[in-house]
Amino acid sequence: MQLMQIAKKSLATGFPGMTKYPVSQKHALAIVGGLFSFIAGSMAKNEPVTVGGFGTFEVRKAGAKVQRNPRTGTPINVPERAVPRIAFSKKVKDAVRTGVAPASIVTADAEDVAAAEAADKK
């Protein structure tokens, strides 16, 4: 399996064609960057972020433990630490299992669309 690396700019390039509203590449890059900043900032404050239909980004605690230096066998105390975690939604898991991506994993409901249209008119 080969690791696929995607730059934020590459995500932003495909973004305008995925929405019903016209979005420039500059604005798409700002949206993608803002989304990642929001998620990282919330996680830094230990606040989980759930993206409906995609998954939940959260921070879990890994407890303190004692490990051994493999060369010397000396015990080393490893302190408790925060570990970022993503719990994917059933839709994402099903797409991975079947190898078929749905047309849209994250969909806006009618209420979200109405709110966005009202905000655009202001």
Image (spheres, grey):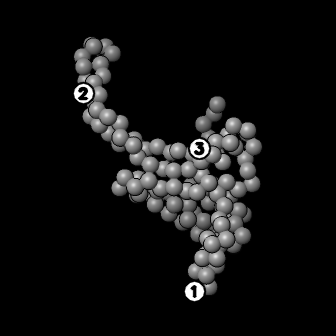
Please tell me which of labels 3 and 2 falls first in the chain. Answer: 3
Q: Residue at x 55, y 65 (%)?
A: 31
Q: Secondary structure at mark 3?
A: loop
Name which quarter of the figure residue 77 lies in: top left
| Mark number, residue 5 | 3
Residue receiving disc 1: 122
| Front label number (3 vs 1) | 1
Q: Nearer the viewer, residue 17 or 87?
A: 87
* Point 62% across, 60% down: residue: 12
Looking at the picture, which amino acid does disc 3 mark?
Gln
The Cα atoms of the two marked residues, 3 and 2, are separated by: 34 Å
Tell me if mark 1 has few (under 14), some (14-19) or many (20+) residues whose alpha carbon lies within 10 angstroms of its own.
few
The quarter of the rendered structure image containing the N terminus is top right
**How many neighbours does mark 3 have within 10 angstroms: few (below 14), some (14-19), or many (20 or more)?**
few
Going from N to C along the chain, the mark reached first, 3 or 1, is: 3
Q: For residue 32, what is the image quadrant?
A: bottom right
Determine the CA span between mark 2 and mark 1. Answer: 57 Å
Instruction: Label 2: state its secondary structure.
Output: strand
For label 1, the SS is loop
Vertical position of residue 91 compared to residue 65: above or below: below
Mark 3–mark 1 distance (CA, rounded to whole Å): 38 Å
* Mark 2 residue type: Asn
Q: Which image quadrant: the C terminus?
A: bottom right
> Where does residue 82 sit, x and y in percent of width and height?
35, 42
The residue that appears at 60% across and 65% down in the rendered structure is: 28
Q: Would you name the residue on which mark 2 appears?
A: 77
User: Percent from the top left, x then y, of residue 46?
Assistant: 37, 52
- Above or below residue 60? Residue 41 is below
